[in-house]
Image (tube, helix red, strand yellow):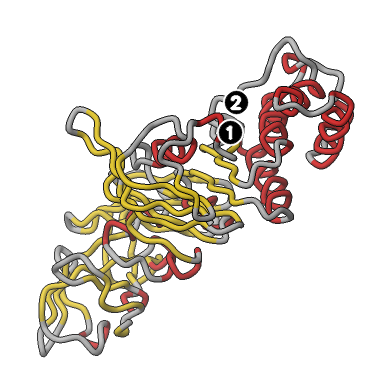
Amino acid sequence: MLHLEDLSLSEGGVPHLAGISLKFKPGLTTLLGRTGAGKTTLLRAIAGLVQPAGRISFNGEDWSHIPPWRRPVAMVTQQFINYPHLNVLDNLAFPLIRRGEEKAAAREAARDMLGRVGLAQMASRRPSELSGGQQQRVAIARALVKGAPILLLDEPFVNLDYNLREGMREELSALLHATRTTVIYASTDPREALRMGDAVVLMSEGRALQSGPPRAVFTAPETLEAAKVVNDPPVNLLGADLSDTGLEIDHLGAAPRDSITGLPPGRYTLALRAEDIRQGGDLMARVALTEVTGSETVTHLDAGGQPLVMLERRIADHALGQNLCITPDLSRALVYGADGRLIAKGGQNG
């Protein structure tokens, strides 16, 4: 088990890691957060490329004084690096030969790995003769062939086009789940992180906000900040005052008191996902922006000064400035208290 204890790192007064304590078991864990959340710094700390305060250990061994080259870690970054003067086979065999393996055995292991990643027919080619996706696959295969018990992947598909990225995710996920490797995969894409990981860690401003199984983290983000990180399109945040007689939502007006049950009167924030705002109803909103992404439409709305985001599982033709009648399904709202912590899920205490 890889154990991180109270890792902290600052540069110029800016915190890059802020008291992170996590445990990673064999399997695939995704780090999810926006650019600047601290994901890359955390991976570099595990690899020994930066030295934070705190403690890193693996299977009980303290890594505080273990240099990067002695750590049983393989890492793949956004900017994949292959040796341009070597063919694909020798790109994979080189790190094995360098650590002392016989050349014939190293090349055999390299051939086996190329077959597993679907590149056996490319063994004699140079990296410059490959597509971007194939080059990234070589970089990942070179990391895997080392047999390191820890594999760090820093947004490895961010520079690939959409279709290639989707295919590579599926292939990599299947390949990695067939091993006992501890894989830590950094991503800015909530859908990717939730779909690929056995566990997910939400990060923001160098902090680990929440960790756990993807479904649990998605359905019950513990804080407003976590709800912002884990949702794409952005989650709708609605200020609301609950009284004994009714519910008043900022900018939107009165709503039925039973939209939120089991809570005392007070000030709350309702977090409502984009798919829980639907067309049709009594609330009028003006279209500010429409984005069609594949077979889905994301529409940004202005409802009396309250910005809203609506997701429709279809291609919708909403004109800029058009007025739409919509209905927020408040029964599906996550309810947060004045301290920003989750106190009710789906309108019920949770």
Is 85 placed left or right of 32 in the picture? right
Q: Is residue 225 above or below residue 9?
A: below
- In this orientation, which residue lies closer to the viewer: 284 or 151? 151
Residue 48 placement (x, y as % from top left): 45, 34
Disc 1 to disc 2, C-alpha distance:
7 Å
Q: Which residue is pictured at 28% across the width and 56% down the height?
A: 225
In the image, 309: left or right of 171? left
Q: Which residue is mark 2?
A: 80
Q: For the point 48% across and 59% down, which residue is it?
A: 312
Q: Amino acid at mark 2?
A: Phe
Q: Pick the residue in front: 155 or 20.
A: 20
Residue 34: percent from left, percent from top = 37, 43
Instruction: Classify mark 1: residues with Cα within 10 Å, few (<14), some (14-19) or many (20+).
Output: many
Q: From the image, tell me which residue sits under label 1.
A: 76
- Quarter holding the C terminus is bottom left
Q: How many marks?
A: 2
Q: Position of residue 127 (x, y in %)?
A: 73, 18
Res 349 seen here = yes
> Is residue 321 at all visible to an observer of this figure?
no
Instruction: State the residue at coordinates (14%, 86%).
Output: 264
Label 2 CA crowd tier, 10 Å (few <14, some 14–19, many 20+): some
Coordinates of residue 162 in the picture (x, y in percent) = 61, 38
Q: Amino acid at mark 1?
A: Val
Can you tell which mark lies on residue 349? none
- The reply to whether callout 1 and callout 2 are in contact (CB within 8 Å) is yes
Question: From the viewer's perspective, is residue 83 above or below residue 111?
Answer: above
Q: Secondary structure at mark 2?
A: loop
Q: Residue at x 49, y 55 (%)?
A: 60
User: Residue 218 is drawn in which quadrant?
Assistant: bottom left
Out of 312 and 165, give the one closest to the viewer: 165
